[in-house]
Image: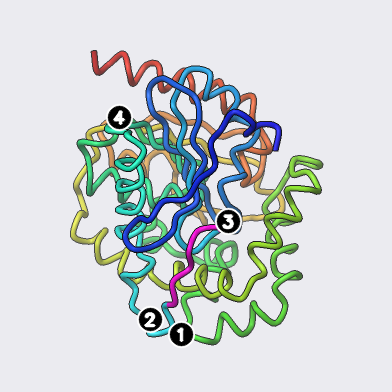
Amino acid sequence: MERFEAFQKDRALVNGLDISYLLGGSGSPVLLLHGYPQCNLIWHKITGALSATHRVLAPDLRGYGESDKPDASNEDHSIYCKRTTASDVVELADRVGLDRFHVVGHDRGARVGHRLALDHPDRVISLVSLDVMPSQAAFDAMDSQLAYAWFHWHLMRQPYPLPETLIGNSAEAYFDFLMERWCATDGAIDDELYAIYKSYFCRPDCVHATCAEYRSVVLDLEHDETDRGRKLSCPVAVYWGANTTKRPGWQTGKGLDMVAAWRDRAHSVEGQGLDCGHFIPEEKPEELSSLLLDFFARSDAART
């Protein structure tokens, strides 16, 4: 793909799994962590701008894309909990020589990034969350609107193999529904990429892995409870898709506030909504790139 021509594509054995990743550019390091139901290709519209001044690492998280998808039919939630995936990312960063880094997470990647910043605070220069309410805040305040918007959470939390069976029997229709409902910008995702995302997602091992990853919220919330009240010391930026016409109740339900929820979890938080849906890196790439580069520059300057 054109935007990744200057990037190295490789695999590394991390925590016993093969993790696929893209690596390119030079400068202050940045980790890009994708979300559901996609893979690291979601960053293709912004990596050109970021890699001009930053060393950029974009893995496929365990269970997604071309990375390994371990079986978790025994419902061992430690296999896909955010703590485990965050440790994958840190070990991968070690393997490619990145010590400290900015973390940008979209969707599930933001939850991994949040846990990474809690578990490895000395490694994180800054954290950016894209269209994500902290899990603990959302489940503490779950209401009918948020439950409606997050139907997929409640489906995939069901015991194995019910969600795998229901989604797997209609994987293409399910994927198409999510992508259509969550995107508010016509033409934002080109046909070639859409076909790649869909081909990865509809594989039975990916359906299982993603269900297991959502089921692991049981353990994620235990980890979050242990850290309740603990605030991140790194600067945090929060950007979200403000167009929720097709996804009412998304992230905030009736009463949550995105920035306020993150300010409960970090000392320094800034943020704003963007005129788009969930897929910010593909729906608003120029605006996002500008915001990220400015935030990274200020965060780097604050360290010196």
Quadrant in which the C terminus appears = top left
**Does residue 279 belong to the magenta stretch?**
no
| Residues in magenta, as a range | 65-71
Residue that label 2 marks:
75
Mark 3 vs 1, N-terminal side: 1
Q: Determine whether the residue tagged by mark 1 lies in a helix, strand or loop.
A: loop
Mark 4–mark 1 distance (CA, rounded to whole Å):
38 Å
x and y, in percent, of residue 98 in the image = 32, 33
Circles 4 and 3, Cβ within 8 Å, touching? The answer is no
Q: In the rendered view, would you say 102 is above or below 254?
A: above
Three-letter amino acid code at the position of disc 2 = Glu
Q: Which residue is mark 3?
A: 249
Whichever of callouts 2 and 1 sits on the residue coming sooner in the sequence is 2
Disc 4 target residue? 125
Q: x and y percent of residue 294 in the render?
A: 46, 18
Q: Position of residue 257 (x, y in %)?
A: 44, 44
Residue plotted at (64% across, 71% down): 203
Considering the image in quadrants, where does the N terminus appear? top right
Question: In the image, residue 57 lies at what x, y percent?
Answer: 45, 37
Viewer-side label of 4, 1: 4
Up the image or down, 284 lies above or below 198; here it is above
Badge 4 amino acid = Ile
Disc 4 secondary structure class: strand
**Cβ atoms at labels 2 and 1 below 8 Å apart:** yes
Check disc 1 and report the residue beneath it: 159
User: Disc 4 versus disc 2: distance between alpha carbons?
Assistant: 34 Å
Q: Residue at x 45, y 43 (%)?
A: 258
Rounded to the nearest whole Å, what is the CA distance between mark 3 and mark 1? 25 Å
